[in-house]
Image (cartoon, helix red, strand yellow):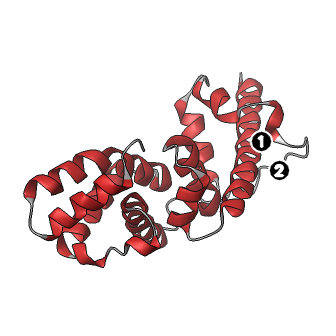
Amino acid sequence: MAFSPNDDLDLLRQLTRGSESAFEALYERYRGPIYRFSLHMSGNTASAEEITQEVFMAVIGKPKTYDPAKGTVAGYLFGIARNLVRHRLQQSAHDIPLMDDCMEEDTSGPTDDIDVLEELSQSESLVYLRKAMLSLPEAYREVVVLCELEEMSYPEAAAVLKCSPGTIASRLNRAKAMLKTKLRRMESGKRCAK
């Protein structure tokens, strides 16, 4: 997010007064990040598209519900998306496994020795990455998406998820360890299948 919170706030104020160009600017600025967040959280392109549209329809419908004292406009938009994703996942909980019970925990220690996401970006298959991400519990998946993929700072992610920056750091470290374990198991399973 390279945009100024003051610029976002100004756009939202203009939107409140009915400015179509302010809405277009806000939409263009956040459409991609909101879509990516929704896609990584839901694992479904159709759901991600619908959620993205619903976020901006909510902003158009009730632009005055934003409270600057509670965080940034970006945090507000991601918060709406988060709630919509959670609602969608609750409706279709039987379709997407949130935990893969057959994967064991990695006891090799902290992930400081390797940048898991760098390793993931070089992985042979994005299928493995998507499967590993979707198998993370929601709280861990959220911090990976917000901090690593959307490049939010810990305080920004904390505002979206309504927790402390320390909690964000802890969840992110744990999520990286879980991803590392899941990807190793998938890779070893692939090698065994050959």
> Label for residue 104?
2
> Are the residues tagged 2 and 1 within 8 Å (C-beta)?
yes
The image quarter in which residue 101 lies: bottom right
The image shows residue 184 at horizontal and vertical percentages of: 76, 34
Tell me the residue at 90%/43% (across/down). Answer: 109
The image shows residue 182 at horizontal and vertical percentages of: 72, 42
Mark whose residue sits in front, 2 or 1? 1
The image quarter in which residue 141 lies: bottom right
Q: As shown in the figure, which amino acid type bears the numbered disc 1?
A: Thr
- Residue 127 drawn above or below residue 83: above
Q: Quadrant of the C terminus?
A: top right
Tell me the residue at 83%/31% (across/down). Answer: 113
Q: Nearer the viewer, residue 13 or 21?
A: 13
Rounded to the nearest angstrom, the CA distance separating label 2 from label 1 is: 8 Å
> Label for residue 181?
1
- Residue 74 drawn above or below residue 187: below
Q: Residues within 10 Å of mark 2 (few under 14, many from 20)?
A: few
The residue tagged with tag 1: helix, strand or loop?
helix
The image shows residue 27 at horizontal and vertical percentages of: 23, 52
The image shows residue 91 at horizontal and vertical percentages of: 43, 73
Q: Nearer the viewer, residue 193 or 141?
A: 141
N-term-proximal mark, 2 vs 1: 2
Q: In this rendering, would 126 be left or right of 60?
A: right
Q: As shown in the figure, which amino acid type bears the numbered disc 2?
A: Glu
The residue tagged with tag 2: helix, strand or loop?
loop
- Residue 76 drawn above or below residue 133: below
Q: In this rendering, would 189 be left or right of 139?
A: right
Q: Residues within 10 Å of mark 1 (few under 14, many from 20)?
A: many
Tell me the residue at 42%/44% (across/down). Answer: 1
Q: Nearer the viewer, residue 85 or 191?
A: 85
